[in-house]
Image: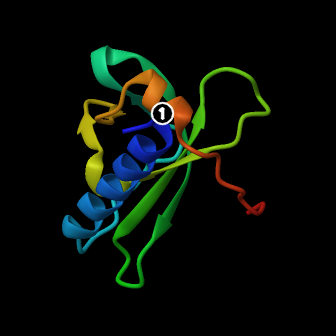
Amino acid sequence: MNRTKLTAAMFAALTLAGAAQAQAQAPSGLEGMTVRGQNGVVLGVVERVTYRDNGAPAQVLVRPKGPPGAGPRSLSYGALRKEGGELSAPLSQAEFNAMPAVNVAPK
């Protein structure tokens, strides 16, 4: 399986995982939290959270660590785990970097 197909499959799996784990109440204070990947590597910081109609978080937009011009990546909230004051994602640095950046309108 080539890298593009693998990335697309992983993105779809993360999105489905999030839909299966929707919560009734939205957690507070996610924006600004550090997101770590496999082996504890810092992937980035939560820039924005999008919510479902019922108020449950759906997607978390993570601004990558590194160049300021890099656009955020969209991760399913359901695929993330809260560990202390940070979030962890089941992704390696390379997998996260291979994800497409999301165009986000200003708040």
Residue drawn where x is 36% and y is 51% of the image: 9
Q: Is residue 67 above or below residue 20?
A: above
Q: Position of residue 65 (x, y in %)?
A: 60, 24
Query: Is 79 on the left or on the right of 105, as rendered?
Result: left
Query: Is 88 on the left or on the right of 50, as rendered?
Result: left
The local secondary structure at tag 1 comes to helix
Q: Is residue 11 above or below residue 71?
A: below
| Residue 83 occupies quadrant | top left
Q: Is residue 47 above or below residue 34?
A: below
Q: In the depicted view, which residue is nearer to us: 69 or 55?
A: 69
Query: Is 92 on the left or on the right of 50, as rendered?
Result: left
Q: Amino acid at mark 1?
A: Phe
Residue located farthest toward the left when viewing the structure as drawn: 20
Q: Position of residue 107 (x, y in %)?
A: 73, 63
**Label 1 belongs to which residue?**
96
Residue located farthest toward the bottom when viewing the structure as drawn: 53
Quadrant position of the N terminus in the picture: top left
Q: In the depicted view, which residue is nearer to us: 98 or 80?
A: 98
Q: Position of residue 50 (x, y in %)?
A: 50, 65
Residue drawn where x is 54% and y is 34% of the image: 98
Q: Position of residue 45 (x, y in %)?
A: 54, 34
Residue drawn where x is 28% and y is 64% of the image: 16
Residue drawn where x is 38% and y is 65% of the image: 57
